């Protein structure tokens, strides 16, 4: 079996749902259920014996060690994190606590467990750390995309905390020999994404006739990847990645924020003409920029393509179509999510 952390969040949920469909191997899912974690996401596998949910914190070293001893997973995949840049600007402490201190305790528990495994078990074991392209900082318009050797230059408390966790993972491989793998991926979008992030926020606001907030001039660029393509990349790295190495993952799909928002509006004009305001793009409103807003991210994913044969399946057009359709078909999910804590966040961030 495998142990997944943060499996009730956006990417972890997609990863687990796909894993249970595709593998006979069971998944133990350790999640703290912060505002971003939602067990409703996993209702499809709730009574499946190949999914075991454990409510807990990756920073609880004793709990993690107990789980490792009880379930003897062949791999740990660490998705658990505080993940929203804007929240890290308002309150960085939770980011340090989970992304840095939490990852440290998780690594310590794994090291303790791994140390006493048989030689064969040790060689087969993997610790896969899921990280982000934001650790590389911000690109100018003419800069080449980030490679695995681009120096780290994180700019937000979020990316700094992820960078710190990546460095710890690297150190545990170099110092203790822990068989680690690290992935640095670009912006994901798709089903089950918490509506604080750009794509679901725009879809939800647009169908409700609310303004579509664009930070600054809307020309910041991100490299968008459909979430199931990220999940397939993680499976490829887990199965065939070289121990101690880093793999960049991206969709080769750079878009300005304004283009992303416009694409969503155009699609909604066709598939949801009953919204209060159509054309949806009339709702676009430019608002104050994010502090320290990174201008451009772009990923060079040639290493994972060349060495592991991984390629994304979805284009931005097919992925955004699937995403918009999912949110339209799952408005109950959206309504449940958009309760207390979420309303509080929207008020704090957008006034
Ligand atoms: P998310 O915020 O949707 O989910 C995070 C999950 O982690 C939640 O279920 C939450 O309850 C859980 N969690 C938080 N703190 C925890 C703790 N201390 N112990 C146990 N569980 C805890 O995040 P996401 O978008 O699914 O991102 C998952 C991972 O992928 C993160 O590490 C993130 O940095 C990375 N990543 C995300 C993106 C993206 O575009 N979303 C891109 C690249 C990398
Ligand atoms: O690059 C990978 C990263 O992508 C992940 O590591 C993070 O966990 C994930 O949240 C995401 O970070 P971003 O900051 O790029 O994503 P977000 O959806 O918050 O914002 C995308 C872009 O849209 C960014 O340039 C800010 C802008 N934006 C965002 C929101 C929420 C707006 O213009 N308006 C908004 O209301």
Image (cartoon, rainbow, N blue to C red):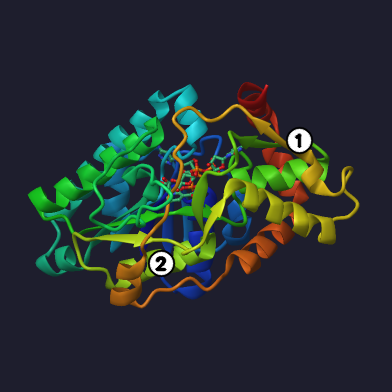
Rendered location of residue 164, percent (x, y): 26, 38
Compared to 49, does 90 lie above or below?
Answer: above
Q: Give the left or right position of residue 287, taking residue 131 as reference.
A: right
Instruction: Find disc 2 in the rendering and name its residue.
Output: 233
Where residue 313 appears, x then y in whole percent?
52, 73
Dividing the image into 4 quarters, which one contains the C terminus? top right
Residue 194, picture quadrant: top right
Nearest the viewer among 62 and 191 is 191
Q: Dot 1 corresponds to which residue?
A: 211
Height in image: 303 above or below 39? below
How many residues crowd around disc 1 within 10 Å: few (fewer than 14), some, or many (20 or more)?
some
- Dividing the picture into quadrants, the one containing residue 96 is top left
x, y (%) of residue 34?
A: 51, 35
Above/below status of 71 relative to 87 = below
Q: Is residue 59 visible?
A: no
* Secondary structure of the residue carrying numbered label 1: loop
Crowding near the residue tagged with mark 2, few <14, some 14–19, many ≥20 C-alpha atoms within 10 Å: many
Mark toward the viewer: 2 or 1: 1
Where residue 330 appears, as percent x and y from the top left, is: 74, 54
- Residue 149 relative to residue 7: left or right: left
Q: Give the residue drawn at x 66%, y 42%.
A: 201
**Residue drawn at point x = 47 percent, y = 63 percent:** 251
Numbered mark located on residue 12 in the image: none
Q: Which of marks 2 and 1 is nearer the N terminus?
A: 1
Q: Distance between the residues labelled 2 and 1?
A: 35 Å
């Amino acid at each position: 079996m495998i142990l997944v952390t943060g499996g009730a969040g956006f990417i972890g949920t997609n990863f687990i749902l796909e894993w249970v469909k595709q593998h006979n191997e069971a998944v133990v899912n350790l999640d703290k259920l912060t505002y971003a974690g939602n067990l409703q996401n996993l209702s499809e596998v709730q009574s499946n014996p190949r999914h075991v949910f454990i409510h807990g914190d990756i920073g609880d070293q004793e709990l993690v060690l107990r789980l490792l001893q009880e379930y003897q997973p062949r791999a740990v995949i660490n998705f658990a994190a505080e993940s929203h840049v804007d929240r890290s600007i308002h309150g960085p402490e939770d980011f340090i606590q989970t992304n840095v201190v939490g990852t440290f305790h998780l690594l310590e528990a794994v090291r303790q467990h791994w140390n006493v495994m048989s030689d064969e078990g040790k060689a087969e074991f993997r610790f896969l750390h899921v990280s982000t392209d934001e650790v590389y900082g911000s690109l100018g318009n003419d800069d080449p995309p980030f490679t695995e050797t681009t120096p780290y230059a994180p700019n937000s408390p979020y990316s700094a905390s992820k960078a710190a966790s990546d460095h710890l993972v690297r150190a545990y491989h170099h110092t203790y020999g822990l068989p680690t793998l690290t992935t640095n991926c670009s912006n994901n979008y798709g089903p089950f994404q918490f509506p604080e992030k750009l794509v679901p926020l725009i879809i939800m606001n647009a169908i409700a006739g609310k303004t579509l907030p664009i930070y600054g001039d809307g020309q910041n660029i991100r490299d968008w990847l459909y979430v199931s393509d990220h999940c397939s990349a993680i499976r490829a790295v887990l199965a065939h990645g070289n121990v101690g190495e880093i793999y960049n993952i991206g969709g080769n799909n750079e878009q300005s924020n304004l283009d992303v928002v416009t694409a969503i509006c155009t699609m909604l004009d066709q598939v949801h003409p009953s919204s209060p305001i159509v054309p949806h793009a009339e709702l676009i409103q430019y608002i104050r920029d994010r502090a320290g807003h990174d201008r451009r991210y772009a990923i060079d994913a040639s290493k994972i393509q060349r060495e592991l044969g991984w390629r994304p399946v979805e284009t931005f057009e097919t992925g955004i179509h699937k995403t918009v359709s999912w949110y339209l078909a799952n408005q109950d999910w959206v309504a449940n999510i958009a309760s207390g804590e979420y309303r509080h966040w929207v008020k704090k961030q957008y006034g």
